[in-house]
Image (cartoon, rainbow, N blue to C red):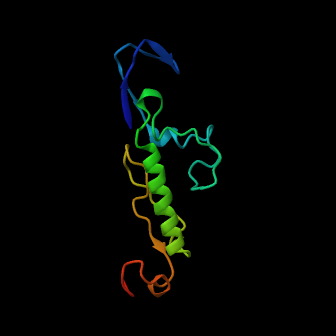
């Protein structure tokens, strides 16, 4: 969630916002808009759309966005390469009841035997 204050009066969806009013943007909801994204709840690394609100915009654009993207790319590539048979253990995911952080309450995964990924934790077993 991001909070801002209205710079000038405006109307949105029949609601009048006055200059100085606090306005809250629910990024998790905005980034899952079915009118903006095809299958917004699906993890898709090849997704073409990139008009998400995750890093803000304009003068509020995140200075760390490039670093965050690089870190995510490295982390996900490492995870996928070291655990090639990584899968969800369950079909249904229980989502956390949190207005700010949207995500699974628990994420149960399965993967190959640790022997198949020797060195991942620095030893032969978990």
Quadrant of the frame with the C terminus? bottom left
The percent position of residue 11, horizontal first and vertical second, equals: 49, 15
Number of numbered tags placed on the structure image: 0
Q: Is residue 115 above or below residue 93?
A: below
Quarter holding residue 51 = top right
Q: Position of residue 10 (x, y in %)?
A: 47, 14
Q: For this rendering, which residue is in front, 119 or 33? A: 119
In this view, the residue in front, 108 or 85, is: 85
Name which residue lies at 41% across and 81% down. 119
Q: Is residue 93 visible?
A: no
Does 6 appear above or below 39? above
- Position of residue 49 measured from the top left corner of the image (x, y, whole percent): 63, 43
Q: Is residue 98 left or right of residue 28?
A: left
| Residue positioned 50% across, 77% down in the render | 111
Which residue sits at x=42%, y=77%? 120
| Rendered-image quadrant of the N terminus | top left
Q: Name the one closer to the observer, 64 or 49.
A: 64
Res. 97 visible in picture? yes
Check the image and report above or below for 103 versus 50: below
Task: Determine the residue positioned at 43% across, 37% down.
Answer: 26
Residue 34 at x, y = what percent? 61, 41
Note whether 33 is above or below 121 in the view shown: above
Image quadrant of residue 122?
A: bottom left
């Amino acid at each position: 969630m991001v909070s801002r204050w209205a710079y000038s009066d405006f109307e949105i969806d029949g609601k009048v916002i006055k200059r100085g009013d606090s306005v809250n943007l629910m990024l998790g909801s905005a980034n899952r808009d079915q009118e903006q994204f095809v299958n917004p709840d699906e993890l898709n690394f090849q997704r073409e759309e990139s008009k998400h609100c995750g890093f803000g915009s304009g003068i509020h654009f995140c200075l760390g966005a490039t670093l965050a993207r690089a870190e995510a790319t490295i982390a996900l590539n490492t995870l996928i390469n070291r655990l090639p048979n990584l899968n969800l253990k369950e079909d249904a995911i229980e989502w956390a009841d949190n207005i700010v952080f949207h995500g699974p309450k628990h994420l149960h995964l399965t993967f190959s035997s640790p022997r198949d990924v020797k060195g991942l934790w620095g030893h032969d077993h978990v």
